[in-house]
Amino acid sequence: MAELIDGKRISKEIKDELKAEAEKFKAEGKEATLAVILVGDDPASAVYVNNKKKACEYIGIKSLSYELPKETTEEELLALIDKLNNDDSVNGILVQLPVPDHIDENKIIRSISPSKDVDGFHPLNVGALLIGEKGFVSCTPAGVIQLLKRSNVDIEGKECVVVGRSNIVGKPMGVLLLRENGTVTIAHSRTKDLKSICKRADILVVAVGKPKMINAEYVKEGAVVIDVGIHRMDNGKLCGDVDFDSVEPHVSKITPVPGGVGPMTIAMLMDNCISSLR
Ligand code: GUN
């Protein structure tokens, strides 16, 4: 039977470390402040934003909340970001995505000062990651690296296959695994013979956005499987991109959904917020 990689436990461990670090900074008169901007009334986004604010409270990060109506113009949003960019008391700025269709997401991402871009989405931070320089790293792939390290999974020299090539997860995930000296393949929807590529993997990270797409036919015996996907099924339960019941008997370690990668994203966001005090 596979060992479950417990993202809930590991994220709590990281948050507790950050809480202790925040207390130390506070004694030196330093406090992190995160500005969280939500435009519109998407219920899922509201839940995510609320969880981010709760995590800030737990750790001792001040959070400023901007909940703007869906009619907010691009100019208004850019003006708020400009104000926060120039406010020295604010360390981090996060605009919850997606933004409404009339707002250009790329323009918003580029408007956040790279030094306050705790999501790690700004092209300057993405570029810094690619060439191994300091910068904010996208939270979900950074969380996957922590899951692997804190579960004693050695990455160096391993065959790592990432399924999915999004700017937020797949691409930075590949770069992070490479930085840890993994041998990395990034597979995607046009990849030929995806099954045999995935079957090569010692470490398989799946971020395709298709419920239960990866079954036992895609995995090598004893592999480590990380499932980034999260979907609500018709019966109301959550599932990932990996067919857990099919894959679990064949692998050495696997993340559950929920309780795997999900909680790690917020923990790493908090780490990015505290890191601006370091
Ligand atoms: N929407 C879904 N995931 C994220 C995330 O990590 N950051 C932001 N800002 N929006 C998101």
Image (cartoon, rainbow, N blue to C red):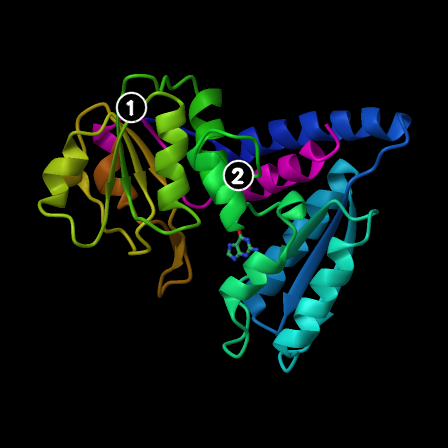
In the image, residue 53 above or below residue 137: below
Amino acid under disc 2: Val
Q: Residue 211: percent from the left, percent from the top?
A: 30, 55
Q: Mark 2 or mark 1: name the one nearer the start of the chain.
A: 2
| Residue at the image point whose x is 35% and y is 45% from the top | 170
Using the image as rendered, state which of residue 238 and residue 156 is in the foreground. Answer: 156
The relative height of residue 107 versus residue 261 in the rendered view (above or below) is below
**Separation of residues labelled 2 and 1 (CA atoms):** 28 Å
- Which residue is more in the foreground, 113 or 240? 113
Query: Is 262 contained in the magenta span?
Result: yes
Left or right side of 82 for 112 = left
**Callout 2: 10 Å neighbours few (<14), some, many (20+)?**
many
The magenta segment: 249-278
Residue 4 x/y as whole percent: 39, 29
Instruction: Classify residue 117 as left or right of residue 128.
Output: right
Q: Nearer the viewer, mark 2 or mark 1?
A: 2
Respond yes or no on whether mark 1 lies under 8 Å from ligand 1: no
> Magenta includes 166?
no
Element on which disc 1 rests: loop
Residue occupied by mark 2: 137
Q: Quadrant of residue 58?
A: top right
Give the residue furthest to the bottom: 71
Which numbered tag is attached to residue 252? Answer: 1
Q: Can see residue 256?
A: no
SS under mark 2 = loop
Specify the amino acid type for callout 1.
Answer: Ser
Which residue lies at the image location 27% right of the left edge and 20% below the top edge? 158
